[in-house]
Image (cartoon, rainbow, N blue to C red):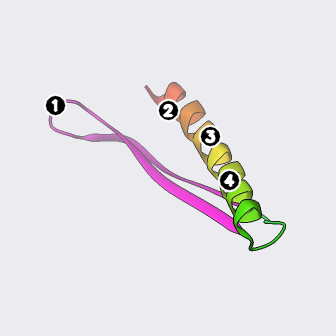
Amino acid sequence: MAEVEISAKVVTDRGGRVLAAKVFRASVPAASTEGPDAVSALDEAFQRVITDLVAWASHVV
């Protein structure tokens, strides 16, 4: 299982006050633990997390 978790914060440019924060997670089963299969699963999990993060940030900002 490939798991990716990223914590993101949107902060003000002055003072660094946190406007919003969220943790993004994704898990994707890997076909095997071999390099190419593991990398493929990690890539898919990362793509899911980043897609969700960008969508969230575009609504927050």
Q: Position of residue 61 (x, y in %)?
A: 43, 25
Foreground: disc 4 or disc 3:
4
Judging from the image, what secondary structure is the residue with disc 3 in? helix
Please tell me which residue is depicted at 21% across the width and 30% down the height of the picture: 13
Please tell me which residue is depicted at 68% across the width and 45% down the height of the picture: 48
Foreground: disc 4 or disc 1:
4
Query: Tag 2 or tag 3, which sits nearer the N-term?
Result: 3
Q: Position of residue 6 (x, y in %)?
A: 50, 54
Which residue bears the numbered disc 4?
A: 45
Which residue bears the numbered disc 2?
A: 57
Amino acid type at image mark 3:
Asp
Judging from the image, what secondary structure is the residue with disc 1 in? loop
Q: Residues within 10 Å of mark 3 (few under 14, many from 20)?
A: some
Please tell me which residue is depicted at 69% across the width and 66% down the height of the picture: 35
Magenta span of residues = 1-27
Query: Tag 1 or tag 3, which sits nearer the N-term?
Result: 1
